[in-house]
Image (cartoon, coloured by chain):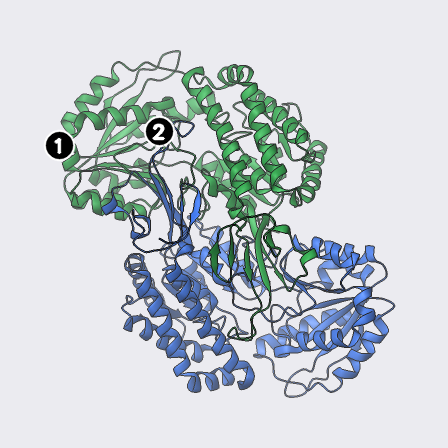
Chain colours: A blue, B green
Amino acid sequence: MTVISTHTTTGPELDEVLSAAAAAAATLRSTPAAARAEALRRAADAIDGAAGELVPLAHEETNLPVRPRLFGELGRTTFQLRLLAEVVEEGSYLEATLDSPDPDWPAGGRPDVRRMLIPVGPVLNFTASNFPFAFSVAGGDTAAALAAGCPVVVKANPGHPEVSARTAALVADALRSAGLPAGTLSVIYGEETGRAALTDPRVRAGAFTGSPAGGRALFDLASSRPDPIPFYAEMGSVNPAFVTPAAAASRTEDITDGYLGSFTLGMGQFCTKPGLLFVPADAAPEFESRLVAALTERPAARLLNDRITDGYERRLAALTAHPAVTVLHAGSSSVEGPAPTLLATAAADLLAHHDELAAECFGPTSIIVRYTSDAEALACARSFTGELSATVQGEGDDDLATALVAALSTRVGRVLWNGWPTGIAVTYAMNHGGPFPATTAPLHTSVGTTALRRFLRPVAYQNMPQRLLPEALRDGNPLCIPRRLDGVLTPPR
Amino acid sequence: MTVISTHTTTGPELDEVLSAAAAAAATLRSTPAAARAEALRRAADAIDGAAGELVPLAHEETNLPVRPRLFGELGRTTFQLRLLAEVVEEGSYLEATLDSPDPDWPAGGRPDVRRMLIPVGPVLNFTASNFPFAFSVAGGDTAAALAAGCPVVVKANPGHPEVSARTAALVADALRSAGLPAGTLSVIYGEETGRAALTDPRVRAGAFTGSPAGGRALFDLASSRPDPIPFYAEMGSVNPAFVTPAAAASRTEDITDGYLGSFTLGMGQFCTKPGLLFVPADAAPEFESRLVAALTERPAARLLNDRITDGYERRLAALTAHPAVTVLHAGSSSVEGPAPTLLATAAADLLAHHDELAAECFGPTSIIVRYTSDAEALACARSFTGELSATVQGEGDDDLATALVAALSTRVGRVLWNGWPTGIAVTYAMNHGGPFPATTAPLHTSVGTTALRRFLRPVAYQNMPQRLLPEALRDGNPLCIPRRLDGVLTPPR
């Protein structure tokens, strides 16, 4: 393990980090699952044990509140590591598949073929600014890559360099104490260094959480290498939420409270912030007056850092200057930072100016979109091409809700019913992804237990003697994992 | 379904094809699995029923022998369609995953989350020259995409336009007879038309089987779209085969016979042709004299078409002109075409000139690589970065074989023991893929039942009422498919 100090990582330092990662990849491939699971748990324990040190450091660097936010986020991070340890032990993520020889199999007979997933090799992880724990050095992408058996080189987010360095040191020590090789986790600093790392042949996959511009530029770099590599960029989203007339009539207060809480949570600095709320035009006045009344009491607060604040102010200025946009409530800026802002537009305008109005505004602003018919609401739903999430607020027997769920499920990674998208539970079924522009890899998720799949590739062994097979594929199932035998998913036995 | 005649597809025709595909995508998403399975079986029946017409047409366009080759390939193609029908019915490919609500789940509680895979939408399939059935209009990529529920637009290979058109007409009729929408399968012609289709927003994924240059150019086009899409290019391989000293001592005749059969099969026009045979230098004379003796009896034969013949001759000329290459047997060219050629080089030269000597030569040529030590053989194995397959000919207690299998399994998609790579059985565990340059998508296979995964993406439903959930995710498991329940893989019940 190599932790470079928080100065920009130099070329020779990067070379050392990447050589160590490549060496670690070879060792990790043959490390038993039990050892990897133990290492993930020790990493979680080390972070939990240092919470009293890490949280204040993160607070200082990100302005995020200590409680409940940062302690909660740290707990999520260590839970994630422990859940993935269970996934590694359970073993079905390997997709172990065994075909027995069959001379009568059509098209020439079937040899003994055995397939499993193996780690792709060193992963370069560009971390997010808005989650100094859960999407940073020991966050989801790192945890998934380590669980998959890949070494990780973290490109530290410039917004929280110190907590990145400290987390990396703690986790690297914990991994080493569990017997994982040096080079399993490293951290590097500097934009140019990150780009150099991404084009290095030793790096076999990339992950990213951040802005559309940053994600796209790095995806282009990864794809244009002499040897292109997979690059998993999660680039945020506007997360449209739709309120049907039936729901608007019966739950105005619930919905306005929930929406307000969701779009102002963490000062709107969530990639799952509902950036657009579609409301029936005739119900809009009541929604808007309730929201504006509530917003007058919302305090200003600091955003993550100056770069984020500048970006937010520029994007908000562009939105408020747009002729189709009305300002319902302008959050006053103080020396502390901005207070939440609420805007409004018409659904027809959103359809006419989709690219300008439906692009993410990272920070505490959202837009009420007034629609005048079910058809118009549906046309709006169909105007999205790729979102992390979409939400429908509907009632039991609600034709518009039915049509919205159907339309949105083919365009987004997650569809919510009568909830709000800002929370993303770390579970088996969770999907945090979606078609471009939400991500560059629609087949994958960056949250949940299937996040490992990004860092694994299949290999098949044909007529291989037992002694040369990985244990996962040997006769008698020595690892006691679920496997597919002659086409049938089979529990461990 | 729209079948354009075999002239170059015009812009308006392409627009019609893509609109039909987009419309079909919406319908196919809600088509029951049983209907899709039935459609795949009807397509297989239609092809089998027309074998007497299709095979002579393919023979005329590709010069491939009618028996056993073309009839065998047709049988493989229809078997593949029927096997994928079973996969669709079995349902585990959907990865249906259900998390029940749990307020005590760490990091904020767990909502009801249900995840499954859904089709990505219209797939554009650039077909191969060397398999007019199995990797063409109704071949592996098409079958996998249809099974996944995606409409397919086939960019016909210019090498067999008539059999492409006829197959498309038969299959499209069969799909329609099973109730699938018009636009489920179409075929287009022309290189420029193919590129235009690949950059059209209605196309959601691309597949390709062919040359490294062609695959890379199309991958770059797909990746540089305003909205990048996944592009699965299988670009061939040199498929190194290693003979250990122990195997060379005990099975010279078996190995030379098998190798000769494998590299000359189909006149070497297989992406899995063993292009390099690594032999211990002291055993090389006996191997080479046996091979040369056998090659004198091998007849010349026509290659697939003039373009392939030209490419083969150019590549062979470059190899024979290389100072590190010796010609062991020069296959004489007749008006019919070339006869097989055998070359030789030293392992040290291969290591020094890897890019020139270890690039694919598509046609009936292979190279014997003489190695002088175990370490040199291992260094050669480690010089590969991405191959579809690698083969080890070894004996029971063979340290070099052990080391070779370990090194090669991290570099290739399939490792064979004491076999030959040219056959690729269509099975559950098969993997036909590998790291770049073998493919542009190391996480995937183009042969075997997991080939569907390329055309599916996850979506999660959160707190969704039963009536709005897809059947695959409803309570009570109405589709009776394997699912993951609260983390546990569970057989249908």
The kind of secondary structure element at disc 1 is: helix
Residue A49 x %, y %? 39, 83
| B350 to the left or right of A88 | left
Q: Residue furthest top?
A: B335
Residue A132 x %, y %? 49, 76
Residue at screen point 55% across, 41% down = B89
Please say whether residue A320 is visible from this viewpoint.
yes
Characterize the local packing of mark 1: few (<14), some (14-19) or many (20 or more) Cα atoms within 10 angstroms.
few
- In space, the residues marked 1 and 2 are separated at their CA atoms by 29 Å
On what subunit does the disc labeled 2 rest?
A
Corner quadrant of residue B362: top left
Characterize the local packing of mark 2: few (<14), some (14-19) or many (20 or more) Cα atoms within 10 angstroms.
few
Q: Residue furthest front?
A: B493
Reading the image, the residue beneath label 1 is: B249
In front of the other: label 1 or label 2? 2
| B102 to the left or right of B68 | right
Q: Amino acid at mark 2?
A: Pro
Residue B401 x %, y %? 20, 43
Q: Amino acid at mark 1?
A: Ala
Residue at screen point 24% across, 44% down = B404
Reading the image, the residue beneath label 2 is: A103
Depth check: A260 or A269 in front?
A: A260
Mark 1 and mark 2, same subunit?
no
Please say whether residue A324 is visible from this viewpoint.
no
On what subunit does the disc labeled 1 rest?
B
Above-or-below relation of B255 to B443: above
